[in-house]
Image (tube, coloured by chain):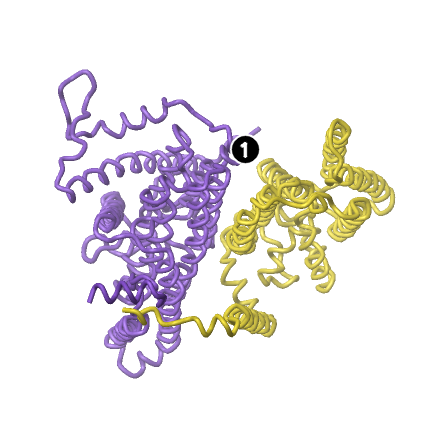
Amino acid sequence: MSPDGGLSIVGTVLAVAVGCAAASLWLLLPRGESGLRERAARRFGMLLGAVALGLFVATGHRLGGVGEEATFLVVSLVAVIGAAATIVTRSPVYSAIWFALALAGVAGVLLVLGAQFLGVATIVVYAGAILVMFLFVLMLAQPTGMASYDRVSNEPLLSAVAGAVLLGLLTLFIGRLSAGPPSCCAVPTKAAALAGANRPTDESDEADAASEPAAADTPNTPALAGTPSAAAGSSPTTHRPSPPDMLARDHVARLGGELFGRHLLAVEAAGVLLLVALIGSIAIVSRTPPEERLEARPRRASA
Amino acid sequence: MSELLPSPTTIAALAKIGLLVGGLMTAAAYLVLVERWIAAWVQDRKGPNRVGIPLTKIRLFGLGQPLADGLKIILKEDFTPRHVDKVLYAAAPLVLLAASLAIFAAIPFGSVLPPLGIEGLPDPIPFLVAPALDVGVLWVFALSSIAVYGVLLGGWASNNKYGFLGGLRSSAQLVAYEIPLGLGLLGVVLAAGSLKLDVIINAQAESGTWYAFAQPLGFIVFLVAAFAEAARLPFDLPEAEQELVGGYHTEYSGIKLLLFLVSEFLHMVTAAFLIVIMFLGGWHLWGVTGSGQEVTWLGAFLRFGVLSAKIFAVILFFMLVRWSWPRFRFDQLMSLAWKVMLPLGLANLVTVAAVEEFRPQLVEAFGAGPAGWVAVLIPWGVFFAGWIAAGLLTPSGTDNTPIHTHGPLDVEHELVEV
């Protein structure tokens, strides 16, 4: 990207996009009004949201091939729209479904960018286990209905503005970090490969860390393209692979080596933490009040 | 412009998808017929044997029945009850069918084709839609957990207590049995060293030892969990027709019901594929198919035939089990998952990990040939130990005696009886 002129144009477009996104979210969040005014507000909010999405897409980098571009746009739009619909829908069951759709979109983004394990694990862990549990409880709780104060969002203005500003800052920051076409999908030129090689390691780590939470919200996070190769443990001095090369690599073995080599302590700590949580939940559940314990009898007492 | 034209790889992938979807749909239709024949045979009836070629008197053993059934159910009115949640009611069967079809992207349905010599195609061509997917087993796992949404939403959107109960039962059952299923898978993945299903078959073909023999405990755990995941009897509580009318699809009719029923059959087919590929050697048969990557045309079709025959045998087993076991009660179902299958699965995993870790030492101590036998015998020892332990520790699995409280009425009743 050209140093100053290009950046300021991008910055202006981003600012407009952030403004549109904030206004759209504020209009869409449920606020307990009803009737014609609310419906008009929702329509206008959807329009503004579409404008914001279009602007965000316009500021992003191109991925290269037509197929990749189209697939990436579709899955990322699914992720963003699903995430927005999760917070603006009133029915908790529909919220959960939209959230599942957003997760599917995120998994799609990860798959397009070559992080197969992360993509599939997102579905297995979030959509397959956690969200099904949510749905289970939501569906059981549904018949009792909800109080009116549960049907409106708290502080819609503040939260919409804060979310949109965070999104804009992340997009700007990540976009500046990965100036130039993302190296995973374009055929790497020598200059691009050298640029990738010269990038300091801690900076790319920061980009990875920053792009993780933003994945659901930003349609154009080109730095994410660096995530699979960085997560797969390729040292920054190697050349970025071209697409067929990237598909042929044994992702899972590399990821496993990285997890149980460099990050062994973190993995073990997480495992111990989960075990403690498991034991704790069993201890809480199995604590019966003393009067029940007296009455509990062996089943065959009467036989 | 040349960028927009599909590459040979894309065309090959599309051809595989077409073959697979067409084959699966036809197979599902005819498996319904087989299931009805087997039901009739078990119950000493004749079963469907009338429908043959229309407008003639040729009956063809009833082979026209699936077509007639399909036409009937497709031409039925697509009725939507007024009390349902319309969007989710329509989406649920689609989600279920899409998930159960997409699973097959990672499942190999044969070995490889010999090189065709077309430029741009990889040689040899694998019988697999997505050969570059490095996480095949996880993909299957992920999409079968997506399939839960179809059942759950169908039950909830129906706004009917039977449907709702079916959906709840189904989600609880599927979530519970995912864990033993995963533990059974992990043992195989650990032994084969890959998440790709074709690599798992190759590992079994090369060693000649199917994982059902090397990991008997894992096989049993996986088999039971696969029955439960496919919601087949004795685990068909989500749609127990004596209690819940039709379970989660009580309110469905016409083509939407057809989608549900087809997906259910596809689940069974998926389970059979997984059982055969992971534990019964896939396309491998000693002395018939060979074990290398180099194949002739005859060899390629022989392997396809062996795999299909094995899958058909497992499906026949599924259908015979349906008429051989009574349904579990829900608490029995849950205690089987958490108290029996989970510990057994863990025991299997630990055994496999230990055997694989100490294999070099085994080879050093016993020599290459006997070490293989020892590596098989240790899991069998664990299998019998686990069987005995499970039998001794959980005897109340079939305890159906009602719970008595000793009130005055009970005492009187007992006196009268004495």
Is A71 on the left-hand or right-hand side of B399? right
Pick the quarter of the image with the C terminus of chain A: bottom left
Q: Which chain is yellow?
A: A
- The location of residue B293, given as percent across then percent down, is 32, 53
Pick the quarter of the image with the N terminus of chain A: top right
Q: Is residue A172 visible?
A: no
Quadrant of residue A11 within the rendered picture: top right
Q: Residue furthest top?
A: B55
Up-down relation of residue A127 to residue B390 (above or below): above
- The location of residue B332, given as percent across then percent down, is 35, 60
Quadrant of residue B63 within the rendered picture: top left
Up-down relation of residue A21 to residue B360 (above or below): above
Is A230 on the left-hand or right-hand side of A292? right
Residue at figure coordinates x 59%, y 41% from the top left: A94
**Amino acid type, callout 1:** Val
Q: Which residue is mark 1?
A: B87
Up-down relation of residue A35 to residue A87 (above or below): above
Q: Residue furthest bottom?
A: B365
- The location of residue A248, given as percent across then percent down, is 49, 52
Q: Chain B is which colour?
A: purple
* Number of numbered tags placed on the structure image: 1
Up-down relation of residue A21 to residue A279 (above or below): above
Q: Is residue A226 visible?
A: yes
- The location of residue A237, given as percent across then percent down, is 65, 62
From the viewer's side, name the closer residue of B8 and A67.
Answer: A67
> Is disc 1 placed on a helix, strand or loop?
helix
